Image: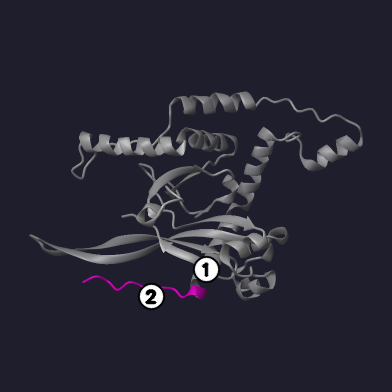
């Protein structure tokens, strides 16, 4: 018999858990993100080789702040080597009744989607970010094919591979890690992609007044601070991805009697939220 699925969280409980998870990421990665930003400035900013206090003192005294660029060449050497290898999605016919012909068909579909997305430029940007400060991302999102026409034609979609211009705007489960031959991995359970909107843009997009910082008081027990959600007069909204896990018991008969295994059944969920409410939600398609 399948085990009962846990009760669905209420909207308040979902928001509380989302706030706690977002704060967990912010606290866990604070030092890492500071060092990543220092690396970015060292590579790309004028006077990036100098800390702000030392630079201010030297400039005030009329002393030079020399910057000798010895990193750009090394970065280009690595990124060019990766780009020349043409990174992309590869299909390998392994198991499950797969064969080379089916794999080639799927590879052709993916090649078409990569071409339509301009994926080479997307991959190159992510590679550059990863080399310069340790993280680079791209996304696979559904895109409508037509904005003109009628009926079903307006609802046709295809996947698109799109760039993430600011990797600092992606917040992932800090306990996630890839597995190795000797160390088991830990699946990612949640992630956030925030976006800052002007209040007028919020009203135009959602047709209602944005929340104020005082509305966050109800959630203050979760450890959040208002500046995280209301930076400099703007309103933060966030895409929130998470995995809900259900289980079912599968039983088979063996020569030694019945054998039961509890099989996990993960489902990926998505919501768009602001500081105090969930604005949209849907399930992410997938196995």
Q: Estimate the x, y position of residue 70 in percent, counting from the top left.
A: 67, 25
Which one is in front, 11 or 184?
11
Judged from the image, the secondary structure of the residue bearing numbered disc 2 is: loop
| Figure quadrant of the N terminus | bottom left
Q: Earlier in the sequence, mark 2 or mark 1?
A: 2
Left or right, 236 with respect to 96, comes to right
Which one is in front, 240 or 22?
240
> Would you name the residue on which mark 2 appears?
7
The correct choice, above or below, for 13 with respect to 171 in the image is below
Q: Which residues are magenta?
A: 1-12
The correct choice, above or below, for 208 with respect to 36 in the image is below
> Which residue is found at the position 70% from the left and 26% from the top?
69
* Cα–Cα span, label 2 and label 1: 18 Å
Q: Estimate the x, y position of residue 219 in percent, counting from the top left.
A: 60, 73
Judged from the image, the secondary structure of the residue bearing numbered disc 1 is: strand
Tell me where residue 151 sits by quadrant.
bottom left
Query: Outermost residue toward the right?
Result: 61
User: Is any part of residue 238 visible from this angle?
Assistant: yes
Residue 4 among those drawn in magenta: yes
User: Is any part of residue 91 visible from this angle?
Assistant: no
> Which residue is found at the position 63% from the left and 56% from the top?
196
Q: How many marks?
A: 2
Which one is in front, 209 or 180?
209
Residue 225 among those drawn in magenta: no
Query: Which mark's residue is nearer the viewer, 2 or 1?
Result: 1
Which mark is on residue 278? Answer: 1
Crowding near the residue tagged with mark 2, few <14, some 14–19, many ≥20 C-alpha atoms within 10 Å: few
Q: Estimate the x, y position of residue 116 in percent, counting from the top left.
A: 42, 38
Main secondary structure of the magenta stretch: loop
């Amino acid at each position: 018999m399948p085990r009962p699925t846990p009760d669905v969280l209420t909207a308040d409980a979902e928001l509380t858990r989302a706030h706690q998870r977002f704060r967990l990421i912010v606290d866990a990665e604070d030092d890492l993100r500071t060092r990543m930003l220092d690396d970015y400035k060292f590579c790309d900013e004028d006077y990036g080789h100098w800390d702000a206090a030392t630079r201010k003192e030297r400039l005030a005294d009329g002393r030079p702040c020399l910057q000798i660029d010895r990193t750009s060449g090394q970065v280009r050497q690595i990124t060019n080597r990766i780009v020349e290898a043409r990174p992309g999605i590869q299909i390998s016919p392994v198991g499950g009744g797969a064969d080379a012909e089916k794999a080639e068909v799927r590879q052709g579909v993916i090649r078409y989607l990569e071409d339509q997305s301009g994926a080479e430029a997307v991959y190159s940007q992510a590679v550059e970010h990863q080399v310069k400060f340790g993280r680079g991302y791209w996304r696979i999102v559904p895109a409508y094919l037509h904005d003109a026409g009628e009926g079903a034609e307006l609802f046709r979609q295809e996947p698109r591979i799109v760039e993430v211009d600011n990797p600092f705007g992606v917040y992932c489960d800090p306990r996630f890690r890839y597995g190795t031959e000797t160390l088991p991995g830990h699946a990612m359970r949640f992630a956030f992609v925030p976006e800052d909107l002007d209040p007028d843009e919020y009203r135009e997009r959602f047709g209602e007044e944005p929340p104020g910082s005082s509305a966050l008081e109800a959630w203050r027990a979760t450890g959040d601070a208002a500046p995280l959600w209301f930076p400099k007069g703007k309103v933060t909204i966030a895409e929130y991805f998470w995995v809900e896990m259900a289980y079912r018991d599968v039983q088979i008969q063996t020569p030694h009697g019945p054998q039961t295994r509890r099989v996990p059944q993960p489902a990926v969920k998505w919501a768009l939220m602001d500081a105090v409410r969930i604005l949209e939600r849907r399930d992410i398609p997938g196995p």
